[in-house]
Image (cartoon, grey):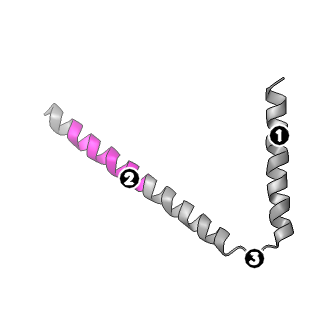
Amino acid sequence: MRDEMDGRLWVAHHDELSLSIDRGLARLRNGLARLATWDGTTPQLFAILAAFLVTSLGFTSTTTA
């Protein structure tokens, strides 16, 4: 009886985890597809990268002190 209950719980959780992983991969794939069709200009891309760089430098400099 206990083995049967454990088996059913494992299957239910396994299916739930599998669906969550599938949804996450689909979101990642959709995000990458949107990035591939990005119609922004090169200066905008450089500005975004510079913003991330400045933010990361700011975070690292405040945590090392």
- The quarter of the rendered structure image containing the N terminus is top left
Q: Secondary structure at mark 2?
A: helix
Determine whether 31 is above or below 54 in the image.
below
Q: Which mark is residue 18?
A: 2
- Residue 32 drawn at (x, y percent): 60, 66
Q: Is residue 17 magenta?
A: yes
CA gap between label 1 and label 2 equals 37 Å
- Residues packed near mark 2 inside 10 Å, few (<14), some (14 to 19) or many (20 plus): few
- The quarter of the rendered structure image containing the C terminus is top right
According to the picture, the residue beneath numbered tag 1 turns out to be 57
Q: Which amino acid is tagged 2? A: Ser
Task: State left or right for residue 7 relative to residue 42.
Answer: left
* Residues in magenta, as a range: 6-20
Q: Secondary structure at mark 3?
A: loop
Q: Residue at x 75, y 76 (%)?
A: 39
Q: Which amino acid is tagged 3? A: Asp
Q: Which amino acid is tagged 1? A: Leu
- Residue 12 drawn at (x, y percent): 30, 47
